[in-house]
Amino acid sequence: MKQSRFKITPESAVNFIRVTVYLTCISLPLSGSPAKFKFEIILWLLVILAISLFIPLLVSIIKYSDDTFIVMKSFILMSAISNYVFKVIIVRIYHKELQQLGSALNEFIKKTSVSEKEILQRYVNNCWMFHGFMTCSYYLTTTAVILGPLILPQKFPTDAVYPFSVENRFVSRIVYLHQSIVGYQCSAGMTLDCQAAMYLWYLSARFEILSSEIRNVDSHNDLRNYIKKHQKTLMDAKELIRPTRLLALVTVMMTKIGMIFGGIVLISDEPVVIKIQFGILVISTTVNIYVCAWAADNLITVSSTKLSNAIFETSWRHEPKMRNLLLTIIYRTQKPIIIKIPGLLDTLSNEYYAEFLSAAFSCFAAARVAVG
């Protein structure tokens, strides 16, 4: 079979995602006081920029409360800004852990063996197109909104109401630039899910490597090193779960808001251009949850069923004492690595995403019938 000439390496995949989430400050280093000070300044400046558009949008809802379209549009944009602000705050809280995990990933890629590289490359081949498509859709959605004034009877991308006149050309350009920057901040906030998913795929690759390495365990010393490696992977997974589940919770909540108001615009009597804008928005937000759900579902499988099966299949050839130690690892694999917040977020998986889609389509169909 002829292989494609176009190939995305693990290094290029990591670099691509790092660039697309730059506006969330997740990639900024904290080595030394000057770097930490720079990080704090940039982060809070970006938060202030986002909030400074959130408030005028809130005012627009009050001023144009009789215009359903403006209200819906402003609510959606406010939810996107909230998504960005909440996620940046999460990045601020867990920045040290995320930086350590990012450094571990870079180090892992540099020092992988040939067999480990093959597993890592297989994961990249499996998901790079989907992640690339989602990232492009986030930024294309923002670009479509920013370019809206070129073909729509509006002055700015949003209907934000300011406490000062925007008729002056210089002021209007500043306002337009500000709204555009915040728009791309929102895109970066959504792309942050791809960053979290990348870390989940990385952990999945490490668990799969453990599944393949168990075949090479022949002595007590080999098994001791294998157990240490398994424990280190579990510790890294524990560090990743804390910020990831919060990011997933924010994504789910804001996605629901975006889908509700975007769906209302789609079934209303609005111009085709506007429906195209919001159609792209609804599609991208609907699929957005799957970015992490897919990676989380795979992590559940490889950290539990796949690993335990691999260990069980090789345990018969070892002496009783080693088999007992292997059974201890199998017992630990019965508790898979899951992304969950009791009472707020069910276990993130393909099953969860299917239930989410079913509920969303049911609500959309009911709303369409009611409007029709």
Image: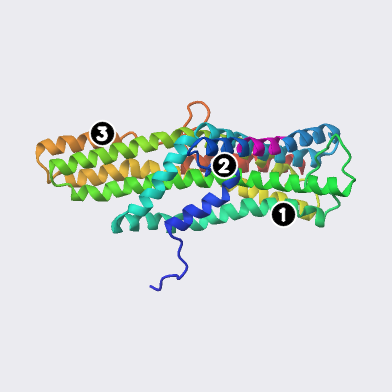
Which callout, 3 or 1, points at the residue further toward the start of the chain? 1
Classified by dominant secondary structure, the portion drawn in magenta counts as helix
How far apart marks 3 and 2 lie (CA) works out to 39 Å
Residue 235 in the image, given as x and y percentages of width and height: 35, 35
Give the total number of marks visible in the rendering: 3
Residue depicted at x 33% and y 40%: 233
**Quadrant of the drawing holding the C terminus:** top right
Disc 3: which residue: 331
The residue sitting at the top extreme is: 343
Which callout, 3 or 2, points at the residue further toward the start of the chain? 2
Disc 1: which residue: 144
Frontmost residue, 282 versus 21: 21
Which callout, 2 or 1, points at the residue further toward the start of the chain? 2
Disc 2: which residue: 25
Q: Is residue 65 magenta?
A: no
Start-end of magenta stretch: 43-51
The secondary structure type at the circle numbered 2 is: loop
The residue sitting at the left extreme is: 319
